[in-house]
Image: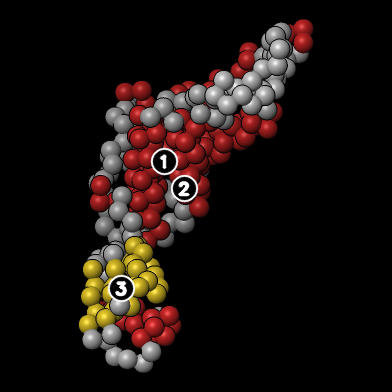
Amino acid sequence: GALVRLADGVPVTRGRLEKMSKSKKNVVGLEAMVDGYGADTVRLLLLSDSPPERDLEWTEAGIEGAWRYANRLFRLVTEPAVELPPPGTALPDGLSAAALSLRALTHKTVAAVDADFAGFRFNRAIARFRELTTGIAEFAPAGPADGWALREASEALVRLVGPMMPHLCEELWQHLGHADTLLLDAPWPEVDPALLAEDTVTVAVQVNGKLRATLTLPRDADKAVAEELALAEDNVARAMAGKPPRKVIVVPNRIVNVVV
């Protein structure tokens, strides 16, 4: 008889079932993929293509993309944009804005990957790797001191990717100057909570309790600055209808309420 859903009786279409068989040419030869691209690349694809609970859709484009990422990672670490200080060098003064931004991205990536690994969300963790990889590739150092931030980012990236691409990352660890240690024995990167805070916040601007505008302000901006910018908003001025404010209530990092 016809197949129906037990819950509501809606007809169910039976999909085609086919046995996996080399004779039917519907089996991916894992050995051939490993021989052609390496175990690290194949492992990266297996973990990045889909969440663990879903079936993997194997494509040539997918393995080629993983291969390109492996090569990009190798080039970034072995050809840094600025000379890196020796391992273990203390954090210098005078880092540029670009270096500070890279440090923030590095620590946010480590924190996010920690959470993704704990939840077995390996595909999301790999997406974070790629974001940090792009951040390193786009990093424009402003001076020698910025090499410290680049080393920190590169070492963190290699350690994060290490569980998925151990062979490549052990080699990159050596390139980073750790000739006497193995990446396998290196500690997991630590997160500086101070670098996880966003540099800017979105603040709501209300007039008599009704939302009229939003402002993007530096975190912990001065109350006078927040008030001045809020009153300069066109929608706020129209809502005030030429009346002077009787009171301006500023809740730092959250809201500016103008009472007229």
Occupied quadrant, residue 200? bottom left
Q: Which residue matches tag 3?
A: 209
Q: Distance from label 3 to label 2 (Cα)?
A: 44 Å
Kind of residue at badge 3: Gly
For the N terminus, the image quarter is top right
Does 28 sit left or right of 183 as displayed? right
> Can you give x and y, in whole percent of width and height, for residue 118 in the image?
35, 29
- Which dot marks residue 240? none
Q: Would you place residue 82 above or below residue 29 in this image?
A: below
Residue pictured at 22% horizontal, 82% vertical:
247
Occupied quadrant, residue 209? bottom left
Q: Indicate which disc, 2 or 1, sits on the residue closer to the N terminus.
A: 2
How many numbered marks appear?
3
Q: Which residue matches tag 2?
A: 136
Does 255 sit left or right of 172 as displayed? left
Kind of residue at badge 1: Ser
Q: Is residue 156 visible?
A: no
Residue pictured at 63% horizontal, 15% vertical:
30
